[in-house]
Image (cartoon, coloured by chain):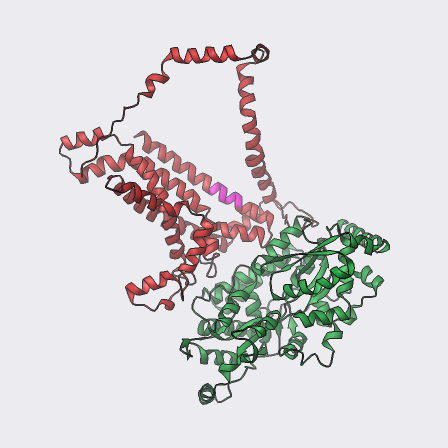
């Protein structure tokens, strides 16, 4: 199917921005409008001081809501503090919390569960999202309508999604089991998606995919639409096949966007809590207990504040480390 | 180290100061908020408290939290020194932590001053709902609501001649409320998957909930009956050989086998509410649940009345029931201490306790329990008395939350997720609990 022509330079914004005379006129107007008193006071400040005045509120806010809690969490992670025992003596335990966490097989199991969940959801959502984006990019009749329909799950609250999928998965009255039963002939109440050790993780993956594939699709769609048409036109002139155009133009040029989608979904799903909590609560047993569920249980059910702070730091370092490596790879791909 | 002493003295001083003031004058201008779980008895308490409002002029407000969120919500409130609750009917397991952290007002001086005697209440209830440390006369709550885990069954199904005959032929005994866990499972198996009135029914609804305390409360009903003990020597925290004894392993295996053979489909995360739904919708022949629900169950239009019967948790090695129930405490951070104490004084009166039972609350005052007409006052009253004689509670230690979470995990992993063996689950539980007690400096 031929791509519709797209005029990439219809709006020559560069010419306006680079027009020094317009900028100069604007600056003169601002200078004339500035009251003398203000102008005099500002005149006494260096550029660096003015810069600090402008960025100080942001830095203070950043320190208050990000850096301070982080430092405090690090400090708590080195103690035996429990938030529900305000009268208990708080002792410095060094790196004992970290040692316990790294030596705890249940924690490692929850990390493996998290990794499985992240890998499964990213793989499926990326393939499906890219495929949908590729199809939507064809601009068929009613494509805008279908795009909106596809985007609906993403706009719903995770709490709503979690609750209604719980009903859908209900083995006796849930629609899901009846649909499966219709196609397979199995008795609807003979299996339970959320309570079966082998199916529970897939149940969560299905819901997460249903909800977040549209998001991946949107980013991939942005990537596909950023590819200039003249490249395809040149390829067609060279008689490149559709397959060749996909592998040599579409995929490489959309890859930074796909990687960005993978990064966003990876970080989101690494810290996935709401959906898992609503659907399985980490069960059956601990089969779907991802790291954030373990963290919540330790912090707010067992009330091991120091221990859970150490776990939070470990998770933070893991996400930050993996994210940094990934961003470097992403930059390398963009530079190609 | 000195802070608990100071806070206890401070609390006592405040109580004394409160009592010396004209309490009724303070109370007359005040409002009180009572926090509890959202369930049937809470509605009865609202009704009961109208008398207190009329007598004292104090307006009663109620904050009832659904059971699955009850501990989270209220413990957060206590931890943060919040002023939401003036009075709290808190779970028995919270006593240790709430006493040691200064969340509850110690009531000994108040009881002495007002002539409220703990000897007027059932000893098991006083020990479970009021005292910390256990075995000492230090009172942090007034026993408010006795409760234990029991069973309800479909009497109308059990009495069917065809089913009676078939059951007798199969098992050699009458189809009747089971006396042991082996009989319980046998009965549940008999009903599992059976067609009754054109509908498929199942054996039993039991507790399997993972998030709060459900599976622990359910499985301990089997464990206690099989002779499970927390320690070899009370107070020594020597758990090896007690928690994972052969009897405990057999009890846990029994609970798992009951879960596997005889529960409705998808019954993997179910507690009180799910059990009630299953029973009221005619899905199950028997349901495990708290005695607190029996008044409401008996009144139920669809399955209540003569269609159902009740029985005490079956024995196996020994008779035992998992303890429920709560005491009522004054929250230390309240600004309405005088009025709150006034409420407790009113609630402790024998006549009020009788009224409490009549409305559907499980009073444990001797004036109620020793009344000659008590056993016949409700169809489940006699069973309640029997159950309360053999109740066992979970750890009431300050670290109870951590101890409970460990047990929830190990039991759910084994029973529902089928991971490992019963012995391995209990061994891991000992390991978890040992770590907790080592951190607490008790081992």
B256 or B330, which is in the foreground?
A: B330
Q: Which chain is green?
A: B
Q: Which chain is red?
A: A
Q: Residue furthest right?
A: B20
B365 or A115, which is in the foreground?
A: B365
Looking at the magenta stretch, what is its main secondary structure? helix
Is residue B290 shown to the viewer in this render?
Answer: no
Segment colored magenta? A312-318
Q: Is residue B333 magenta?
A: no
Residue A254: % across, % down: 29, 36
Residue A267: % across, % down: 43, 42
Report the label total: 0
A73 or B310, which is in the foreground?
A: B310
Q: Quadrant of residue B151?
A: bottom right
Query: Compared with residue A91, is residue B163 higher up or lower down, i.e. above or below?
Result: below
Query: Compared with residue B15, is residue A51 higher up or lower down, i.e. above or below?
Result: above
Taking A220 as reference, is B33 left or right? right
Residue at the (27%, 35%) spot, across then down: A252
């Amino acid at each position: 199917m031929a791509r519709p022509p797209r005029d990439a330079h219809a709006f020559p914004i560069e010419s306006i921005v680079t027009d020094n005379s317009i900028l100069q006129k604007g600056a003169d107007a601002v200078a004339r409008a500035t009251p003398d008193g203000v102008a005099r006071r500002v005149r006494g400040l260096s550029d660096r001081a003015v810069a600090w005045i402008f960025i100080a509120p942001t830095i203070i806010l950043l320190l208050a809501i990000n850096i301070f809690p982080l430092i405090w969490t690090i400090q708590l992670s080195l103690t035996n503090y429990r938030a529900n025992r305000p009268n208990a003596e708080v002792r410095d335990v060094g790196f004992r919390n970290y040692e316990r966490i790294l030596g705890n097989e249940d924690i490692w199991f929850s990390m493996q569960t998290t990794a499985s969940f992240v890998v499964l959801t990213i793989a499926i959502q990326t393939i499906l999202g890219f495929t949908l984006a590729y199809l939507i990019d064809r601009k068929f009749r009613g494509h805008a309508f279908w795009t909106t329909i596809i985007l609906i799950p993403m706009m719903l609250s995770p709490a709503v999604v979690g609750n209604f999928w719980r009903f859908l998965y209900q083995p006796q009255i849930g629609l899901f089991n009846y649909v499966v039963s219709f196609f397979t002939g199995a008795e609807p109440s003979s299996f339970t998606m959320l309570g079966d050790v082998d199916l529970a993780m897939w149940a969560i993956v299905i819901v997460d995919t249903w909800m977040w594939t549209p998001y991946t699709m949107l980013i991939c769609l942005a990537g596909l639409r950023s590819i200039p048409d003249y490249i395809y036109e040149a390829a067609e002139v060279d008689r490149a096949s559709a397959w060749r155009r996909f592998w040599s133009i579409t995929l490489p040029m959309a890859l930074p966007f796909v990687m960005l989608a993978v990064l966003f979904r990876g970080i989101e799903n690494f810290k996935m809590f709401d959906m898992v909590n609503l659907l399985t609560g980490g069960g059956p047993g601990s089969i779907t207990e991802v790291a954030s569920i373990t963290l919540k249980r330790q912090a707010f059910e067992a009330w091991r504040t120091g221990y859970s702070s150490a776990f939070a730091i470990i998770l933070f370092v893991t996400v930050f480390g993996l994210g940094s490596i990934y961003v470097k790879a992403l930059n390398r791909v963009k530079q190609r | 180290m000195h802070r608990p002493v100071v806070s206890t003295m401070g609390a006592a001083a405040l109580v004394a100061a409160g009592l010396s003031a004209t309490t009724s004058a303070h109370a007359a201008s005040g409002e009180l908020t009572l926090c509890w779980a959202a369930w049937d008895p809470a509605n009865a308490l609202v009704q009961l408290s109208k008398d207190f409002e009329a007598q004292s002029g104090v307006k009663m407000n109620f904050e009832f939290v659904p059971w699955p969120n009850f501990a989270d919500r209220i413990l957060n409130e206590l931890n943060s020194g919040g002023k939401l609750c003036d009075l709290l009917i808190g779970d028995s397991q919270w006593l240790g932590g709430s006493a040691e952290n200064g969340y509850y007002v110690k009531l000994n001086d108040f009881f002495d001053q007002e002539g409220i005697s703990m000897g007027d209440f059932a000893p098991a209830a006083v020990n479970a709902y009021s005292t910390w440390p256990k075995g000492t006369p230090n009172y942090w709550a007034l026993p408010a609501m006795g409760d234990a885990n029991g069973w309800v069954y479909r009497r109308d199904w059990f009495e069917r001649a065809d089913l009676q005959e078939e059951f007798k032929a199969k098992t050699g005994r009458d189809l009747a409320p089971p006396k042991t866990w082996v009989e319980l499972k046998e009965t549940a198996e008999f009903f599992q998957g059976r067609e009754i009135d054109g509908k498929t029914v199942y054996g039993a609804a039991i507790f399997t909930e993972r998030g709060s305390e459900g599976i622990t409360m359910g499985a301990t009903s089997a464990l206690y009956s099989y002779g499970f003990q927390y320690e070899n020597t009370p107070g020594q925290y020597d758990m090896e050989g007690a928690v994972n004894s052969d009897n405990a392993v057999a009890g846990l295996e029994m609970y798992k086998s009951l879960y596997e053979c005889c529960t409705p489909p998808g019954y993997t995360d179910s507690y009180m509410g799910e059990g009630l739904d299953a029973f009221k919708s005619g899905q199950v022949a028997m349901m495990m649940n708290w005695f607190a629900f029996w008044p409401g169950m008996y009144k139920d239009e669809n399955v209540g009345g003569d269609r159902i019967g009740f029985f005490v948790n079956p024995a196996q090695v020994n008779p035992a029931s998992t303890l429920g129930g709560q005491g009522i405490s004054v929250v230390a951070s309240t600004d309405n201490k005088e009025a709150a104490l006034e409420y407790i004084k009113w609630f402790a009166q024998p006549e009020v306790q009788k009224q409490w039972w009549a409305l559907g609350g499980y009073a444990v005052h001797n004036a109620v329990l020793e009344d000659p007409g008590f056993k016949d006052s409700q169809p489940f009253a006699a069973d309640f008395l029997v159950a309360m004689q053999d109740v066992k509670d979970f750890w009431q230690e300050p670290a109870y939350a951590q101890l409970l979470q460990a047990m929830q995990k190990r039991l759910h992993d084994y029973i529902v997720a089928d991971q490992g063996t019963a012995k391995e689950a209990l061994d891991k539980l000992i390991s978890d609990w040992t770590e907790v007690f080592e951190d607490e400096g008790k081992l």
